[in-house]
Image: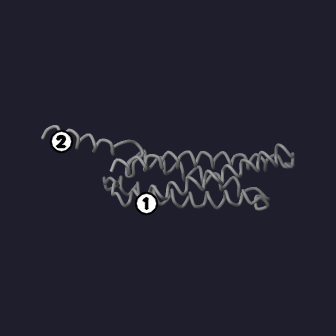
Amino acid sequence: MRNCLFWVEKLKKMKDFAGTPGTLTGLALRIAQFMFAAGSIASMATTSSFFNFTAFCYLIASMGLQVIWSFGLALMDAYALAKKRVLHNPILVSLFVIGDWVTATLSLAAASASAGITVLYFHDIGGCTIVAECFKYQIAVAFAFLSWLAVFTSSLIMFWLLAAG
């Protein structure tokens, strides 16, 4: 009987790690996702000609989705922290896994496409005549990659939590 209780406690601890929903580190990950995505949008939107490039428009759309998703989950994490509840419901975790993987895939695709256009157009072809604008494009792409890194970390944590049962 004691051996069985040992394994039950061991399985419970597999769910208690940094970044899970309803924890302070989970909230920090969501806030990082939100801030980097918002920074990417702000940097890109302050340029005068981002709409001339499809990849940049896709970056704005993808980061917009990331802002909405991350802000919503950050609010949920903050609420769970305030009420001292842990959000480990299997259905809820499944939703988090799917949402995180979708937004991670879209974010990586948008960041990679925008980075490719930035390198091709502004460095290889030499089409950048306004240096400040080129710098804003590069900052937007860097923020997009940082946002992807945060959401990818979160998606791996959610997948582990779902697998742990």
- The spot of residue 95 in percent (x, y) is 43, 60
Position of the N terminus, as image quadrant, is top left
- The spot of residue 164 in percent (x, y) is 34, 47
Q: Amino acid at mark 2?
A: Leu
Identify which residue, 130 or 11, lies in the foreground. 11
Q: Earlier in the sequence, mark 2 or mark 1?
A: 2
Numbered circles on residues, count: 2
Q: In this rendering, would 130 be left or right of 85?
A: right
Q: What colouring does the structure picture have? A: one colour
Identify which residue, 43 or 122, lies in the foreground. 122
Task: Kindly identify which numbered label has been placed on residue 5.
Answer: 2
- Would you say the residues marked 2 and 1 are in contact, meaning their CB atoms lie under 8 Å apart? no
- The spot of residue 21 in percent (x, y) is 39, 52
Label 1, residues with CA under 10 Å away: few <14, some 14-19, many ≥20? few
**Going 60% across and 60% down the picture, which residue do you hit?**
64
**Going 18% across and 41% down the picture, which residue do you hit?**
4
Q: Secondary structure at mark 1?
A: helix
**Going 31% across and 56% down the picture, which residue do you hit?**
83
- The spot of residue 103 in percent (x, y) is 55, 56
Task: Kindly identify which numbered label has been placed on residue 95.
Answer: 1
Task: Kindly identify which numbered label has been placed on residue 71.
Answer: none
Q: Amino acid at mark 1?
A: Leu
**Going 36% across and 61% down the picture, which residue do you hit?**
91
Identify which residue, 117 or 25, lies in the foreground. 117
Q: In this rendering, would 25 be left or right of 89?
A: right
